[in-house]
Amino acid sequence: MICTQCGSEMVQTDKNTMTGRVIREYECRNCGHSDWEDDGVALWQVLHDAYEKEEDKSSASPAPTHPDVHPPEPLASRSLWHRFCRIFRNS
Ligand SMILES: [Zn+2]
């Protein structure tokens, strides 16, 4: 990177990927001017995005239907059972 102040070659002093982008910091050894450049998306951010996309795919698929533990007993069968019992009680 060339210093915008004096035109000298700048030295990279830091590399920051905390924001999800690679930010390279430069310092001019000639005049002390410091600058930075955006070097694109950081690798971990790319991986993170790819992972999130996978997550979206799996959550978009239909959720498994919650199995009914105890389906409500139909009234008809219950009354049939009562009628059945009554027959035996009467005999
Ligand atoms: Zn400079």
Image: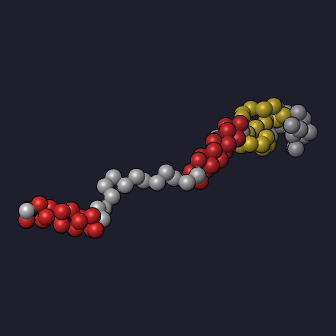
Q: Position of residue 47 (x, y in %)?
A: 67, 38
Query: Compared to 90, does 30 lie above or below?
Result: above
Q: Position of residue 73 (x, y in %)?
A: 29, 62
In the rendered image, is residue 17 in sight? Answer: no
In the rendered image, is residue 86 in sight? Answer: yes
Q: Position of residue 48 (x, y in %)?
A: 64, 41
Q: Residue furthest left?
A: 90
Residue toward you, 19 or 28: 19
Q: On the rendered structure, is 9 left or right of 56?
A: right
Q: Residue furthest right?
A: 7
- The part of the image, by quadrant, that contains residue 77 is bottom left
Count of marks, rendered view: 0
Q: Which quadrant of the rendered structure holds the N terminus?
A: top right
Q: On the rendered structure, is 86 left or right of 36?
A: left
Q: On the rendered structure, is 53 left or right of 79?
A: right
Visual colour scheme: secondary structure
Q: Residue at x 31, y 55 (%)?
A: 70
Q: Position of residue 21 (x, y in %)?
A: 71, 43
- The part of the image, by quadrant, that contains residue 8 is top right
- The part of the image, by quadrant, that contains residue 27 is top right
Q: Residue at x 63, y 44 (%)?
A: 54
Residue toward you, 31 or 21: 21
Residue toward you, 89 or 7: 89
Q: Which quadrant of the rendered structure holds the C terminus?
A: bottom left
Q: Residue at x 13, y 64 (%)?
A: 87
Residue toward you, 4 or 54: 54
Query: Compared to 25, does 88 lie above or below?
Result: below
Q: Residue at x 78, y 36 (%)?
A: 26
